[in-house]
Image (spheres, rainbow, N blue to C red):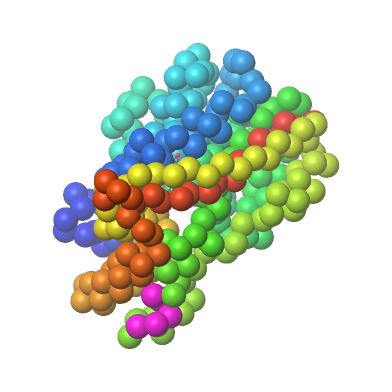
Amino acid sequence: MSTSPSSGGQALNDWSAAQYLKFEDERTLPARDLLSRVPLTSPKRVVDLGCGPANSTAVIESRYPNANLVGIDSSPDMIRKAKATLPHLDFTVEDLTSYSPQGEVDLFYSNAVFQWLKKEERFEIVKKLMATQPSGGVFALQVPDNLAEPSHVLMRKTATSGPWAQKLASVGRDTFQTPLEIYDLLKPISSAVNIFHTSYYHALENHAAIIEWVKGTGLRPFLDPLQPEEKEGFLKEYLKGLQQAYPACEDGRVLLRYPRLFVVAVKK
Ligand SMILES: C[S@@+](CC[C@H](N)C(=O)[O-])C[C@H]1O[C@@H](n2cnc3c(N)ncnc32)[C@H](O)[C@@H]1O
Protein backbone atom coordinates (compact mmCIF):
# COMPACT_ATOMS: atom_id res chain seq x y z
CA MET A 1 0.00 0.00 0.00
CA SER A 2 1.35 3.48 -0.81
CA THR A 3 2.09 5.86 1.99
CA SER A 4 1.98 9.60 2.32
CA PRO A 5 5.45 11.13 2.76
CA SER A 6 4.32 13.44 5.55
CA SER A 7 2.47 10.94 7.65
CA GLY A 8 5.23 8.82 9.16
CA GLY A 9 4.07 5.62 7.48
CA GLN A 10 0.31 6.21 7.50
CA ALA A 11 -1.25 4.67 4.37
CA LEU A 12 -2.99 7.00 1.92
CA ASN A 13 -6.71 7.21 2.72
CA ASP A 14 -6.13 5.57 6.10
CA TRP A 15 -7.46 7.38 9.15
CA SER A 16 -4.95 9.68 10.82
CA ALA A 17 -4.62 9.23 14.57
CA ALA A 18 -2.83 12.60 14.84
CA GLN A 19 -5.61 14.50 13.03
CA TYR A 20 -8.28 12.68 15.04
CA LEU A 21 -6.60 13.47 18.36
CA LYS A 22 -6.52 17.23 17.73
CA PHE A 23 -9.89 17.27 19.50
CA GLU A 24 -9.26 14.37 21.86
CA ASP A 25 -11.03 15.85 24.89
CA GLU A 26 -14.18 16.74 22.97
CA ARG A 27 -14.28 13.42 21.12
CA THR A 28 -13.82 11.45 24.35
CA LEU A 29 -16.75 13.10 26.19
CA PRO A 30 -19.39 10.87 24.55
CA ALA A 31 -17.15 7.84 25.21
CA ARG A 32 -17.45 8.60 28.94
CA ASP A 33 -21.18 9.30 28.72
CA LEU A 34 -21.78 6.01 26.92
CA LEU A 35 -19.77 4.03 29.44
CA SER A 36 -21.54 5.67 32.38
CA ARG A 37 -24.79 4.07 31.19
CA VAL A 38 -23.43 0.51 30.96
CA PRO A 39 -25.12 -1.47 33.76
CA LEU A 40 -22.18 -3.80 34.53
CA THR A 41 -20.03 -3.60 37.66
CA SER A 42 -17.20 -5.99 36.81
CA PRO A 43 -17.30 -7.45 33.30
CA LYS A 44 -14.61 -10.10 32.72
CA ARG A 45 -14.11 -9.60 29.00
CA VAL A 46 -14.57 -6.30 27.15
CA VAL A 47 -13.94 -5.44 23.49
CA ASP A 48 -13.62 -1.86 22.21
CA LEU A 49 -14.91 -2.14 18.63
CA GLY A 50 -13.30 0.56 16.45
CA CYS A 51 -11.02 1.62 19.30
CA GLY A 52 -9.23 4.29 17.22
CA PRO A 53 -6.11 5.62 18.99
CA ALA A 54 -7.30 4.05 22.30
CA ASN A 55 -8.89 7.17 23.78
CA SER A 56 -12.11 5.22 24.31
CA THR A 57 -10.18 2.14 25.51
CA ALA A 58 -8.48 4.25 28.19
CA VAL A 59 -11.89 5.37 29.44
CA ILE A 60 -13.04 1.73 29.66
CA GLU A 61 -9.85 0.72 31.43
CA SER A 62 -10.28 3.37 34.09
CA ARG A 63 -13.76 2.05 34.97
CA TYR A 64 -12.90 -1.66 34.60
CA PRO A 65 -9.18 -1.98 35.50
CA ASN A 66 -9.50 -5.73 36.15
CA ALA A 67 -11.25 -6.65 32.90
CA ASN A 68 -9.59 -8.51 30.07
CA LEU A 69 -9.84 -5.58 27.66
CA VAL A 70 -8.90 -5.61 23.97
CA GLY A 71 -9.36 -3.18 21.07
CA ILE A 72 -9.89 -3.78 17.37
CA ASP A 73 -9.86 -1.27 14.51
CA SER A 74 -9.51 -1.52 10.73
CA SER A 75 -7.00 1.35 10.57
CA PRO A 76 -3.31 0.42 10.88
CA ASP A 77 -2.44 4.01 11.88
CA MET A 78 -5.01 3.98 14.68
CA ILE A 79 -3.83 0.60 15.97
CA ARG A 80 -0.19 1.74 15.87
CA LYS A 81 -1.13 4.72 18.03
CA ALA A 82 -3.33 2.58 20.34
CA LYS A 83 -0.45 0.15 20.99
CA ALA A 84 1.92 3.01 21.73
CA THR A 85 -0.57 4.59 24.14
CA LEU A 86 -1.60 1.49 26.10
CA PRO A 87 1.22 -1.01 25.43
CA HIS A 88 0.00 -3.44 28.11
CA LEU A 89 -3.28 -4.08 26.22
CA ASP A 90 -3.95 -6.15 23.12
CA PHE A 91 -4.91 -4.20 19.95
CA THR A 92 -5.40 -5.75 16.52
CA VAL A 93 -6.16 -4.51 13.03
CA GLU A 94 -9.51 -6.10 12.22
CA ASP A 95 -12.54 -5.10 10.25
CA LEU A 96 -15.89 -5.21 12.02
CA THR A 97 -17.52 -6.73 8.97
CA SER A 98 -15.45 -9.91 9.35
CA TYR A 99 -14.66 -9.87 13.08
CA SER A 100 -15.71 -12.72 15.35
CA PRO A 101 -14.76 -12.81 19.01
CA GLN A 102 -12.86 -15.64 20.65
CA GLY A 103 -15.00 -16.75 23.58
CA GLU A 104 -17.76 -14.91 25.38
CA VAL A 105 -17.59 -11.13 25.73
CA ASP A 106 -19.50 -9.41 28.56
CA LEU A 107 -19.30 -5.95 27.04
CA PHE A 108 -19.06 -4.90 23.42
CA TYR A 109 -18.45 -1.17 23.39
CA SER A 110 -18.25 1.00 20.29
CA ASN A 111 -17.87 4.77 20.32
CA ALA A 112 -18.34 6.69 17.04
CA VAL A 113 -17.83 3.76 14.66
CA PHE A 114 -21.05 2.15 13.41
CA GLN A 115 -22.03 5.18 11.30
CA TRP A 116 -19.13 4.25 9.01
CA LEU A 117 -20.60 0.83 8.17
CA LYS A 118 -23.13 0.24 5.40
CA LYS A 119 -26.63 0.76 6.71
CA GLU A 120 -27.76 -2.80 6.07
CA GLU A 121 -24.67 -4.27 7.75
CA ARG A 122 -24.74 -2.34 11.04
CA PHE A 123 -27.36 -4.18 13.03
CA GLU A 124 -26.60 -7.52 11.37
CA ILE A 125 -23.17 -7.14 12.98
CA VAL A 126 -24.62 -6.05 16.33
CA LYS A 127 -27.04 -8.99 16.35
CA LYS A 128 -24.33 -11.45 15.27
CA LEU A 129 -22.05 -10.29 18.09
CA MET A 130 -24.85 -10.21 20.68
CA ALA A 131 -25.69 -13.82 19.74
CA THR A 132 -22.26 -14.81 21.11
CA GLN A 133 -22.75 -12.97 24.44
CA PRO A 134 -23.92 -14.51 27.72
CA SER A 135 -27.28 -13.52 29.14
CA GLY A 136 -26.85 -10.11 30.83
CA GLY A 137 -24.03 -9.14 28.46
CA VAL A 138 -24.16 -5.60 27.12
CA PHE A 139 -23.74 -4.03 23.70
CA ALA A 140 -23.17 -0.26 23.93
CA LEU A 141 -22.73 2.03 20.96
CA GLN A 142 -22.74 5.74 20.19
CA VAL A 143 -22.93 7.40 16.79
CA PRO A 144 -22.95 11.05 15.68
CA ASP A 145 -26.40 12.23 14.60
CA ASN A 146 -25.14 15.24 12.69
CA LEU A 147 -26.01 14.72 9.03
CA ALA A 148 -28.57 17.53 9.26
CA GLU A 149 -26.14 19.95 10.96
CA PRO A 150 -24.74 22.82 8.83
CA SER A 151 -21.23 21.31 9.11
CA HIS A 152 -22.39 18.22 7.21
CA VAL A 153 -25.08 19.75 4.98
CA LEU A 154 -22.44 22.21 3.70
CA MET A 155 -19.97 19.41 3.04
CA ARG A 156 -22.46 17.77 0.70
CA LYS A 157 -23.50 21.09 -0.83
CA THR A 158 -19.88 22.04 -1.55
CA ALA A 159 -19.32 18.60 -3.07
CA THR A 160 -22.11 19.09 -5.60
CA SER A 161 -21.30 22.65 -6.60
CA GLY A 162 -17.72 22.78 -7.83
CA PRO A 163 -15.47 21.38 -10.56
CA TRP A 164 -15.01 18.31 -8.30
CA ALA A 165 -18.76 17.45 -8.41
CA GLN A 166 -18.39 14.41 -10.67
CA LYS A 167 -15.53 12.95 -8.62
CA LEU A 168 -17.57 13.29 -5.43
CA ALA A 169 -20.93 12.22 -6.88
CA SER A 170 -21.17 9.01 -4.87
CA VAL A 171 -19.54 10.22 -1.64
CA GLY A 172 -21.64 10.41 1.52
CA ARG A 173 -22.59 8.50 4.60
CA ASP A 174 -25.74 6.38 4.93
CA THR A 175 -28.30 7.85 7.34
CA PHE A 176 -28.43 6.03 10.66
CA GLN A 177 -31.34 3.86 11.77
CA THR A 178 -33.98 5.73 13.79
CA PRO A 179 -34.47 5.02 17.53
CA LEU A 180 -37.70 3.16 16.67
CA GLU A 181 -35.93 0.97 14.10
CA ILE A 182 -33.08 0.28 16.54
CA TYR A 183 -35.48 -0.65 19.33
CA ASP A 184 -37.42 -3.03 17.07
CA LEU A 185 -34.21 -4.62 15.75
CA LEU A 186 -32.69 -5.26 19.18
CA LYS A 187 -35.66 -5.87 21.49
CA PRO A 188 -36.28 -9.50 20.41
CA ILE A 189 -32.80 -10.48 21.69
CA SER A 190 -32.55 -8.01 24.60
CA SER A 191 -34.02 -7.73 28.09
CA ALA A 192 -33.58 -3.94 27.86
CA VAL A 193 -32.80 -1.48 25.09
CA ASN A 194 -31.93 2.02 26.35
CA ILE A 195 -31.66 4.73 23.74
CA PHE A 196 -30.76 8.33 24.45
CA HIS A 197 -29.62 11.42 22.66
CA THR A 198 -27.29 14.26 23.69
CA SER A 199 -26.31 17.46 21.90
CA TYR A 200 -22.85 18.76 22.75
CA TYR A 201 -21.92 22.37 22.02
CA HIS A 202 -18.19 22.56 21.43
CA ALA A 203 -16.76 26.08 21.66
CA LEU A 204 -14.11 25.92 18.93
CA GLU A 205 -11.49 28.56 18.32
CA ASN A 206 -12.90 29.73 14.96
CA HIS A 207 -14.53 28.46 11.75
CA ALA A 208 -11.29 26.96 10.51
CA ALA A 209 -11.32 24.76 13.62
CA ILE A 210 -14.60 23.21 12.46
CA ILE A 211 -12.74 22.14 9.33
CA GLU A 212 -9.87 20.74 11.40
CA TRP A 213 -12.43 18.78 13.42
CA VAL A 214 -14.24 17.22 10.45
CA LYS A 215 -10.97 16.59 8.57
CA GLY A 216 -10.34 13.89 11.18
CA THR A 217 -13.68 12.18 10.43
CA GLY A 218 -16.60 13.14 8.16
CA LEU A 219 -14.70 15.28 5.64
CA ARG A 220 -12.16 12.53 4.87
CA PRO A 221 -14.21 10.78 2.15
CA PHE A 222 -14.76 14.14 0.40
CA LEU A 223 -11.10 15.22 0.44
CA ASP A 224 -9.42 11.86 -0.19
CA PRO A 225 -10.34 11.64 -3.91
CA LEU A 226 -9.25 15.25 -4.68
CA GLN A 227 -5.96 16.58 -6.06
CA PRO A 228 -4.17 19.19 -3.87
CA GLU A 229 -5.49 22.20 -5.84
CA GLU A 230 -9.04 20.80 -5.83
CA LYS A 231 -8.78 20.23 -2.07
CA GLU A 232 -7.76 23.84 -1.62
CA GLY A 233 -10.73 25.06 -3.69
CA PHE A 234 -13.14 22.78 -1.86
CA LEU A 235 -11.93 23.92 1.56
CA LYS A 236 -12.18 27.59 0.58
CA GLU A 237 -15.83 27.17 -0.51
CA TYR A 238 -16.65 25.07 2.54
CA LEU A 239 -15.12 27.64 4.91
CA LYS A 240 -17.19 30.41 3.28
CA GLY A 241 -20.36 28.41 3.93
CA LEU A 242 -19.38 27.70 7.55
CA GLN A 243 -18.74 31.39 8.19
CA GLN A 244 -22.29 32.17 7.06
CA ALA A 245 -23.93 29.28 8.92
CA TYR A 246 -22.21 29.62 12.32
CA PRO A 247 -22.34 33.08 13.93
CA ALA A 248 -19.31 33.84 16.10
CA CYS A 249 -19.68 34.21 19.89
CA GLU A 250 -18.70 37.47 21.60
CA ASP A 251 -15.26 36.06 22.40
CA GLY A 252 -14.78 35.08 18.75
CA ARG A 253 -15.29 31.36 19.31
CA VAL A 254 -17.76 29.29 17.30
CA LEU A 255 -20.24 26.85 18.84
CA LEU A 256 -20.27 23.57 16.99
CA ARG A 257 -23.53 21.80 17.88
CA TYR A 258 -22.92 18.07 17.84
CA PRO A 259 -25.91 15.76 18.39
CA ARG A 260 -25.16 12.11 19.20
CA LEU A 261 -27.28 8.98 19.56
CA PHE A 262 -26.56 6.33 22.21
CA VAL A 263 -27.78 2.73 22.46
CA VAL A 264 -27.24 0.33 25.36
CA ALA A 265 -28.75 -3.14 24.90
CA VAL A 266 -28.71 -5.92 27.51
CA LYS A 267 -28.70 -9.47 26.12
CA LYS A 268 -31.79 -11.50 27.10
C1 LIG B 1 -14.41 8.29 14.96
S1 LIG B 1 -13.20 7.05 15.28
C2 LIG B 1 -13.62 6.48 16.92
C3 LIG B 1 -12.42 6.15 17.74
C4 LIG B 1 -12.68 5.88 19.22
N1 LIG B 1 -13.56 4.73 19.39
C5 LIG B 1 -13.27 7.07 19.96
O1 LIG B 1 -14.11 6.86 20.83
O2 LIG B 1 -12.90 8.22 19.72
C6 LIG B 1 -13.84 5.78 14.25
C7 LIG B 1 -12.93 4.56 14.18
O3 LIG B 1 -13.67 3.52 13.53
C8 LIG B 1 -12.75 2.78 12.77
N2 LIG B 1 -13.52 2.00 11.79
C9 LIG B 1 -14.26 2.49 10.76
N3 LIG B 1 -14.79 1.46 10.05
C10 LIG B 1 -14.39 0.32 10.67
C11 LIG B 1 -14.60 -1.06 10.42
N4 LIG B 1 -15.33 -1.47 9.37
N5 LIG B 1 -14.03 -1.98 11.24
C12 LIG B 1 -13.27 -1.57 12.28
N6 LIG B 1 -13.02 -0.28 12.57
C13 LIG B 1 -13.58 0.65 11.77
C14 LIG B 1 -11.83 3.83 12.18
O4 LIG B 1 -10.62 3.28 11.74
C15 LIG B 1 -11.67 4.79 13.35
O5 LIG B 1 -10.56 4.49 14.14
For the N terminus, give its image quadrant: bottom left
Q: Is residue 174 visible?
A: yes
- Seen at 40% across and 64% down, the residue is 245
- Please, is residue 228 above or below residue 165 in the view? above
> On the picture, is 38 further left or further right than 187?
left
Quadrant of the image for the C terminus? top right
**166 vs 151: above or below:** below
Out of 178 and 73, give the one closest to the viewer: 178
Q: Nearer the viewer, residue 33 or 126?
A: 33
The location of residue 201, given as percent across then percent down, is 44, 44
* Quarter of image, res 195: top right
Q: Residue furthest front?
A: 250
Q: Which residues are magenta?
A: 158-162
Residue 240 on image: x %, y %: 30, 70
Residue 268 lies in the magenta stretch: no
Q: Position of residue 129 (x, y in %)?
A: 66, 40
Q: Does residue 233 lie above or below 54 as drawn?
A: below
Is 161 included in the stretch rendered in magenta? yes
Residue 125, given in percent of the width and then of the height, sits at 64, 48
Above or below: residue 216 compared with residue 61: below
Q: Nearer the viewer, residue 174 or 208?
A: 208
Q: Quadrant of residue 219?
A: bottom left
Q: Is 207 left or right of 68, judged from the image as shown? A: left
